[in-house]
Amino acid sequence: MSITYHYATVAIAIEQLREKGFTEDFNLDGNYLVSQVGRFGDSDFEIAHVYFYEGESNPDDEATVYGIESGTGHKGVLVTGNDVFADNAESSIIKKLLHHNKPAE
């Protein structure tokens, strides 16, 4: 289960996660999350925290910051913009991220 937050900037969200021990930098690579510690498929990690950043004047400036914890205990940060979802809509990683992307109404 993830915890959802909203902060004014991406930098604040990342700082908050770093303070919670999320020190790895995760990136998307096809159908995997990758970092210096390894490569993780959609069943190899959980989303522990989600932070939303909304651009004030342009919806394209929206971003989501995820606190990711791998099954092996590695904790890190993944930052995505809206464009990543459109470009990779069929990816199982993207589907898992989208499940956590918007706060419950």
Image (cartoon, rainbow, N blue to C red):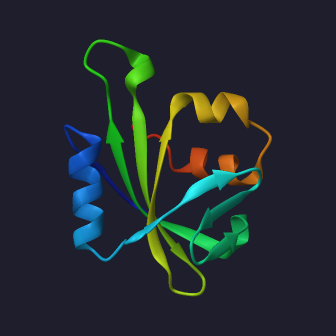
Q: Outermost residue toward the front?
A: 36
State the residue at coordinates (58%, 50%): 97
The percent coordinates of residue 5 (x first, y second) are: 28, 51
Q: Quadrant of residue 63?
A: top left
State the residue at coordinates (73%, 67%): 41
State the residue at coordinates (64%, 52%): 28
The percent coordinates of residue 20 (x first, y second) are: 27, 74
The percent coordinates of residue 34 (x first, y second) are: 63, 64
State the residue at coordinates (35%, 41%): 52
Q: Is residue 78 above or below residue 61?
A: below
Q: Where does the C terminus fall, quadrant-wise?
A: top left
Q: How many marks?
A: 0
Residue 48 showing in the rendered view:
yes
The percent coordinates of residue 86 (x first, y second) are: 67, 28
- Which residue occupies the foreground of this view, 80 or 98? 80
Question: Does residue 28 appear to the left or right of 20 in the view shown?
Answer: right
Residue 104 showing in the rendered view:
no
Q: Is residue 15 above or below residue 83?
A: below
Q: Outermost residue toward the top?
A: 57
Q: Quadrant of residue 98?
A: top right
